[in-house]
Amino acid sequence: MNRRTFHRAPEGERRQELIEATLDCISEFGLKGATVRQIAIRAGVTAGLVRHYFDSKDQMVAEAYRAVIASLTEKAKNVEGDPATRLKEFIAVNFTEPVADSRSVSLWAAFISQVRVDPVLAEIHREGYLAFRNTLQELLSEFLAAKGRPASAEECRRHAIAINGLVDGLWVEGCLAGDLFRDGELVSIAMASVEALIGLPIEN
Amino acid sequence: MNRRTFHRAPEGERRQELIEATLDCISEFGLKGATVRQIAIRAGVTAGLVRHYFDSKDQMVAEAYRAVIASLTEKAKNVEGDPATRLKEFIAVNFTEPVADSRSVSLWAAFISQVRVDPVLAEIHREGYLAFRNTLQELLSEFLAAKGRPASAEECRRHAIAINGLVDGLWVEGCLAGDLFRDGELVSIAMASVEALIGLPIEN
DNA sequence: GAAGCTATTATACGCTTGAATAATAGCGAC
DNA sequence: GTCGCTATTATTCAAGCGTATAATAGCTTC
């Protein structure tokens, strides 16, 4: 009997590979089509291994969701420079790969659709949303202060909610049907809209 | 052998019931949990009947998607009154039941997540999005004209894209985690934001 | 009220699913 | 080298899936 040769990977690495394979499958075949076997094939291992690393498929999917949310918010957090530059970048990053990608929005939607079903996913979503919005709120606060138009936390909160909504909405449509928009149109609309919302130009 | 008694329903009615049951199951159990059997139970019939009305489960799901998109856009279209009232209502309706409901956003997300997988769903989504956005664009055009600030189609297009994004984004978060917002806060933020975006008050 | 049509039920089939178990091969320690 | 640990493979299992088919019960027509 010819048994396949294989490579014994370090735990962290293999877990990461499995999660990445899970996300690939969900985005390509949908949550329904992301079966343990498909995921294993994608990761280049056999199906049994999944259960060696995760208690269940559901647990693996939940961890995969965490990874998605993290990747969507981390890109936006690590921006350097003065407040104006950071605010600008924070918005622009959502319309640039890898965030602006049909794979990302497919994954996001797949998980969103389960929020009502699975309280674990609901909690992960909530944390991710608040992290993103609070970062934005802080950015706005600093930006407005630097522009000599300091605003109350409450005012910044409302602005953050609106801008977050705007960016999310444009991001979704851009990813789903990018061909409905001209090159760079979405980021241009987003930028102009944010300026209109806060009543200030962003350029520094 | 005791066979269940049943009611012979008119074709249209039964189809409608099956589609509604499909949507109920998708929103409650997710696409994965919306099995033919569950759907049949929800509709109060047996599983076999599904295939009497639809060529396949997939076809039924696609029709169900059409129904969702239609319900999300129809509510917004049928608004009467002067341009300002109609614009106001068009936006407000998205933050009022039945559009503003966790069931709606679950369904929307479930289908969005399949857009990449299934070209049929992609086309349905595209039509729905454009219908919504074009209606909004027309509304904006009339509103601006009525306010004595007529705008070009291009300008209205950009405004429609931005407002559509804003409304969509706020709608999603409001439906998913309504408790993160105060009563009426979202519609208030939405209204204020739209006014900022077009640079005019909406009240008539 | 009997006949005929078909919407509906009931049952069965082949496949795929997530999971459990047993066998084995890679690899570090000594 | 070879021993021992365990990551990995291979195989199996019961449950649930979408679908196919045959029997039947509710209407309609006359």
Image (spheres, coloured by chain):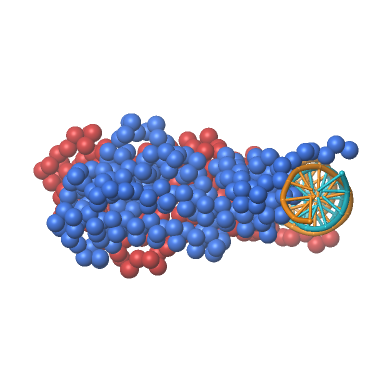
Chain colours: A blue, B red, C orange, D cyan
Task: Give above or below for A177 relative to A118.
Answer: above
Residue pictured at 61% horizontal, 45% vertical: A17
In the image, taking residue B53 as reference, residue A77 lies left or right, namely left
In the image, A28: left or right of B155?
Answer: right
B173 horizontally vs D23: left or right: left
Is residue B52 visible from the viewing direction of this image?
no
Q: Nearer the viewer, residue B51 or A66?
A: A66
Query: From the image, which quarter does the C terminus of chain B lie in?
Result: bottom left
Q: Position of residue B135 (x, y in %)?
A: 31, 42
Question: Residue C20: percent from the left, percent from the top?
Answer: 80, 59
Which residue appears at 12% of the width and 42% of the height? B149
Measuring from the top left, give residue B63's x and y in whole percent: 54, 43
Residue A173 sits in which quadrant? top left
Quadrant of residue B132 within the rendered picture: top left
A65, above or below A98, in the image: below
Identify which residue is drawn at 30% across, 64% down. Answer: B185
**Count of labels shown?**
0
Considering depth in this image, is A21 or C18 the residue closer to the camera?
A21
Front-lying residue, A204 or B9: A204
On screen, residue C27 versus residue B144, left or right, reads: right
Q: Quadrant of the N terminus of chain B?
A: bottom right
